[in-house]
Image (cartoon, rainbow, N blue to C red):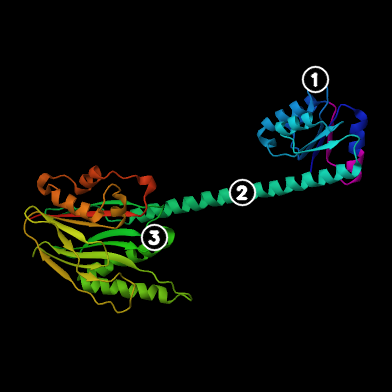
Amino acid sequence: MKILLVDDEPGILALLERVLRHAGYHDLITAESASTALTYIHNTSIDLILIDIMMPNIDGITACRRIREHPAYIDTPIIMLTAFDNRTHLSRAFEAGATDYITKPISIEELLARVRNALRFKLMLDASKEREQTMQVLFKKIMHEIELAKNIQRGVLSAPLSNPHIETDAFYEPSQQLAGDLYSWFPIDQHRYGVIVLDVMGHGVAASLISMSVRSLLRGMITRLGDPIAVMTELNRHMHTLFSRSAHPVPHYFTAIYLMIDTQTQVIEYVNAGHPAGFLLTSTQRPQLLTEGCLPIGLVTNLPMRKGCIPYDGETLLVLYTDGLLAAMEDSENDISSLHSLCASFPLLSGRSFIDYIFSRYPLNLRHLEDDICLVTIRLKI
């Protein structure tokens, strides 16, 4: 490690150099003035500086202050050499950035002990900085990978659907980079559509992995089975199959609401698996809650469930959401009642988006979400 020795007395410099070389420190630079020392600071890398306080032109305290202004020398150990134990000088030296001091006449044992301690500190500091840099590189890599995963997760969400019979819209915002919430819809045949909104227990990477695992099955499962009870039963079987293979199985579950909409018979069949109740809105009736169903998916192996069945006639709006929406409605004393009131007051035939309507009443602070938010609307036309 490189040591810089600074003193205007050639005899002191020679003594310091001889003692340190004899102790095994061979990478030494000497300077007889602070200005020369400051030149070395800008042109080479120094690990330890020993500098006299009392020198002409630029004294050691001023030099110490200037050294600390250099970004590379913010933490470099600086040992001050002083001819007398003057508290005022030492106080000024420490304020300028000195880390230690040695009084003259110099004790060889004290000199070597303080040099060893200073270099040990420098080695520890360099190792800490290297670990920090490694962690920063790793963190940037992880954040890049998470950003890619986030884009993939958003990419698998269903695109808006619009035809003369049905129109879908959605709002989706994770509380972290990755979310456990998910929505999907698929045409089953010419007249039937399957729509699902789910919320995996927890947040972040683990929840997103489960939701993506479920997402990979949905298209084939919904288009093949269609019926809400059949789809939810198959999802429950999948959850138990997925985690029973682990040596240390961890209980995972998700809430969900799945609807099969038949635009020809104008009937909605659904199962609500422990999920917040969606709303069915018409222009002539009060909002109807979608509550029929079962426990959350994955809680028990044999999951008894009931299917809800609702006919519709005329303009109809279905509102499905995850519980993060309720948590985001900050100014409400009773969030579910407030949401019910919003649904009841929504002008169904205005053509205005319900998503725009609700967030105009409850603006979101997207930087401080407590939970993932998923809000889906389905407009049924006759």
Circle 2: residue type = Glu
SS assignment at label 1:
loop
Q: Position of residue 216 (x, y in %)?
A: 34, 65
Relative side of 77 to 250, left or right? right
The count of marks equals: 3
Label 2: which residue? 132
Q: Is residue 25 at all visible to an observer of this figure? A: no
Q: Residue furthest bottom?
A: 302
User: Dividing the picture into quarters, in which one does residue 194 lie?
Assistant: bottom left
Residue ID at (44%, 74%)? 249
Label 3: which residue? 208
Relative side of 371 to 68, left or right? left
Q: Split into 4 quadrants, where in the image is the N terminus? A: top right
Residue ID at (15%, 63%)? 261
Residue 172 vs 72, above or below: the answer is below
**Dot 2: few (<14), some (14–19), or many (≥20) neighbours within 10 Å?**
few
What residue range appears in magenta?
Answer: 18-32
Label 1: which residue? 57
Circle 1: residue type = Asn
Circle 3: residue type = Ser
**Residue nearest the viewer, comparing 29 with 79:** 79
Chain-order first, disc 3 or disc 2: 2
Q: Split into 4 quadrants, where in the image is the C terminus? A: bottom left
**Residue nearest the viewer, comparing 51 with 237:** 51
User: Dividing the picture into quarters, in which one does residue 281 lie?
Assistant: bottom left
Alpha carbons under labels 3 and 2: distance apart: 29 Å
